[in-house]
Image (spheres, rainbow, N blue to C red):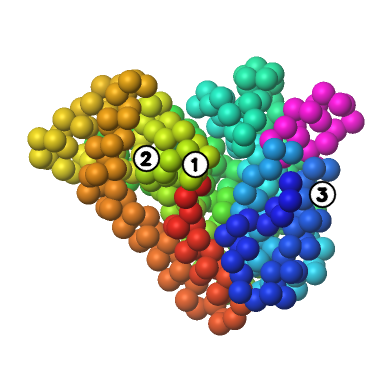
Amino acid sequence: MGNSLPKQLRLVSDRKLLKDLEARMVEVEARIIAATTSADALVTEMSSHLAKAGGKRMRPGLVLLTAQLGDPDAPEVVDAAVVMEVTHLATLYHDDVMDQASTRRGVDTAHLVWGNNVAILTGDLLFARASNIVASLGQEALTMQAQVFEQLVLGQLNETIGPREGQDPLAHYLDVLRDKTGSLIALSARLGALLSGADASYQQPLQAFGERIGVAFQLVDDIIDIQSTTEQSGKVSGTDLLAGVPTLPVFLLENHKDKESVELLQLIKSGLSAQNLPEVLEKLRAHVVMDEAQTETQRWADQAVAAISGLPAGSVKSALEAFAAAVVERQG
């Protein structure tokens, strides 16, 4: 799998820090594979399906980075990094069933290979594995993990139900992103600091950083879905649009009442086909909503950076700031 350190962290300017993070990520990677392995060969094939396919490893990378605020050699740090990735993997099995996605990380999704029931149970198994590991990390870490587990489920539930009557659809969407993505990234940032014995005053700033950067990360995906070519992102443009998945530019299009915008929104909401998707993509790319979406995404990243303004100056804070910038600038 090559260098599994997230590309957002490969931009770390402190070479000693970068080398340390890379070395620790090798250990984390091996432990992720071990955590998704079972005595039963078929169960191993199912539970390690996505782990072996790779991934960004953003969450364990954040654990390792924020552990540098305390004692990065504390043995619980690597365990926490593994817990974060295994929990994330579990959510992906469930998400792909809910969305009926066909591919994930360049491989067929588990529900296509083994069926919905097996995919859901495999996700449950990975949640159980993560819980077994986090149980050894102390009551505070265990409580945090349980709270985030609830938040993850509520995020998926609220996404499935949709906005209530009178609720702002965009506000509902951002709440879902915070719960489904931001919560686990926030926990990753917090656990590294907690288990390395870093100053307790860092906890809330890191929580806010993680939540906000998680929302920004997903909003960038919305922009990539429309803006990027397959060569840039490795994804087929307009996949979310075609599937009727709500995205930030479409929400923002609701605010434009000119004739062209109204007609474009109606076309999107009426259900797109492979035939008219290129035309819609072309019109969206030329529309001011793309600039507005970029501005909104940058706002979330800026708020993430603002949240950690009180952290001590140094390589970790600089790396977190660079991380936020890299999230907004990514094209895939």
**Foreground residue among 152 and 72:** 72
**Residue 237: x and y, percent?**
42, 35
- The tag earlier along the polypeptide, 1 or 3, is 3
Evaluate whether residue 123 shows in this view: yes
Which mark is drawn over residue 30? 3
- Seen in the image, is 217 located left or right of residue 49? left
**Residue 113: x and y, percent?**
67, 20
Residue depicted at 33% across the width and 27% down the height: 277
- Seen in the image, is 256 located left or right of residue 94? left
Question: Does residue 297 belong to the magenta stretch?
Answer: no
Q: Quadrant of residue 254?
A: top left
Residue depicted at 50% across the width and 78% down the height: 310
Marks 1 and 2 close (CB-CB < 8 Å) = no
Which mark is drawn over residue 300? none
From the image, state whether disc 1 or disc 3 is nearer to you.
1
Where does the magenta region start and end?
Answer: 35-51
- Seen in the image, is 139 located left or right of residue 288? right
Question: Does residue 47 belong to the magenta stretch?
Answer: yes
- The tag earlier along the polypeptide, 1 or 2, is 2
Residue depicted at 29% across the width and 24% down the height: 276
Residue depicted at 89% across the width and 31% down the height: 39
Residue bearing the label numbered 2: 226
Residue bearing the label numbered 1: 231
SS for dot 1: helix
- The CA span between labels 1 and 2 is 13 Å
